[in-house]
Amino acid sequence: MVKVELYTNKGCAACVSAKRLLDQKGVAYEEKKLGTSARMDREFLVRTEGSKSVPQIFIGEKWIGGFDDVLRYDRANELDWLLGLEDRPKVSVLAKLIRMMRGQTF
């Protein structure tokens, strides 16, 4: 299984939802709580290119984005593949083209 990292903050409902989704899938993850150290906060800013919202989720070395982004992958039936839970889903050429035109990377 791939390494999953979540940058979270206290009082963040979307962070709780992201953790709940990963827990439901049986995926182990490392939670990195912002505000616990200056080093952690700097790491967050560098890895997320200055993002100000949480959660921010990494699967392997791929920066997925926030909870809404994870939900998009899940609805596209690609999250389980990214997490190493399933084989890569078959996606039609048309669906790939539409995603590309929308600027979606999955």
Image (tube, helix red, strand yellow):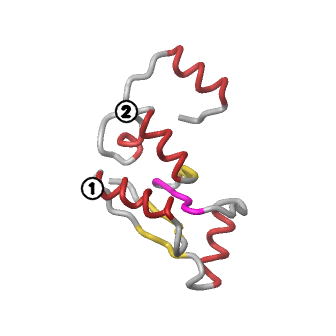
- Nearer the N terminus, badge 1 or badge 2? 1
Q: Which residues are magenta?
A: 54-59
Whole-percent x, y for residue 55 in the image? 54, 61
Which residue is the site of mark 1?
26
**Quarter occupied by residue 31:** bottom left
Label 2 environment density (alpha carbons within 10 Å; few <14, some 14–19, many ≥20)? few
Left/right placement of residue 58 relative to residue 46 reads left
Q: Amino acid at mark 1?
A: Gly
Q: Secondary structure at mark 1?
A: loop
Q: Distance between the Cα atoms at labels 1 and 2?
A: 18 Å
Magenta: main secondary structure equals strand
Q: Look at 47% across and 39% down and name the residue there.
A: 73
Q: Look at 37% across and 53% down and name the residue there.
A: 21
Numbered mark located on residue 9 in the image:
none
Q: Amino acid at mark 2?
A: Arg
Which residue is the site of mark 2?
88
Q: Look at 53% across and 67% down and name the residue there.
A: 12
Q: Does residue 57 show up magenta in the picture?
A: yes
Whole-percent x, y for residue 105 in the image? 58, 36
**Quarter occupied by residue 41:** bottom right
Q: Does residue 56 show up magenta in the picture?
A: yes
